[in-house]
Amino acid sequence: MSSAAKLQPVAQKRRFPIVARAAITAAALGVWFWTQSLIGARKLHGEAIGDGIHTLTHRINAYLQGHSATTNALLIVSSAIIDSLGIYLLAKWIFGKSARPFVGLLIVLGLRQLMQGLVALPTPPDDLWHYPGFPSLLVTYGVSNDFFYSGHTSIAVFGATELWREGRAWLRIVAVFVVVFEIATVLILRAHYTMDVYTGLVTALLAAVLADRWTRPSAA
């Protein structure tokens, strides 16, 4: 059998995947340019930062504007969760065998403080962030302009990754609940913009990966 004959079946096998990949690429580019056209046609209202999640949760925020007790309860519970996660992570570092929790916190909080120094955002309209009448160990109610990125979200997500590593089903359920609750709370209370939450989430996941890699015992 000639070399050309040997190559022909391979070419035939590859032809469809290449066509499929080209079609998928064309479709992806089409979606990209279409969505860009939608973004370009969008009109901003005044000088405020547009936030679609804030718009979607407007009714919940409006309800909380008139119910201070519920708002205070959300703030207290949310901060208590952050305090608990912070204590858990630090205790796991101090009394445990791995430096991973501490290294992850250093990455999350170090990058956050760097971003705070570089980026200043205006306070979201209808902001409900205030001292709820109950103190917190780690949450600074007196600071109300530290938006990018969300400390509540990043600590919740990084703490959730450590809870997940424990391997127990009920702790994994708690981890998911904590992340969802913290994200929903800071958005509904207008304590953060959606971009703050997204960046905090992604940064925490990256911190979890890097902290695990940097503190993992060498194979040697």
Image: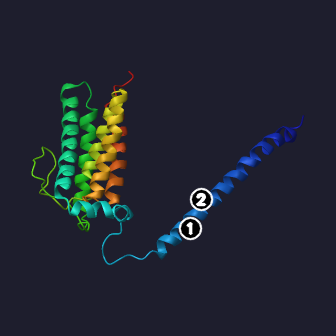
Q: 216 or 79, which lies in front?
A: 79
Q: Identify which amino acid the numbered label 2 is placed on.
A: Ala
Q: Which residue is mark 1?
A: 33
Disc 2 from disc 1: Cα separation:
9 Å
Locate the N terminus by quadrant. Answer: top right
From this viewpoint, is residue 88 visible?
yes
Q: Which residue is mark 2?
A: 28
Q: Identify which amino acid the numbered label 1 is placed on.
A: Phe
Q: Is residue 5 left or right of residue 131?
A: right
For disc 1, the neighbor class at 10 Å (few under 14, some 14 to 19, many from 20) is few
Q: Is residue 62 left or right of residue 213?
A: left
The kind of secondary structure element at disc 1 is helix
The kind of secondary structure element at disc 2 is helix
Query: What is the x, y in percent for residue 158?
Result: 31, 41
In the displayed image of the protein, which residue is found farthest to the right?
A: 1
Give the quadrant of residue 12: top right
Q: Earlier in the sequence, mark 2 or mark 1?
A: 2
Q: Which residue lies at the image location 37% right of the left edge and 28% below the top edge?
A: 169
Query: What is the x, y in percent for residue 131?
Result: 12, 55
Query: What is the x, y in percent for residue 215?
Result: 31, 31
Locate the C terminus by quadrant. Answer: top left
Q: Which residue lies at the image location 71% right of the left edge and 47% below the top edge?
A: 17
219 is higher (above) or lower (below) than 193 = above
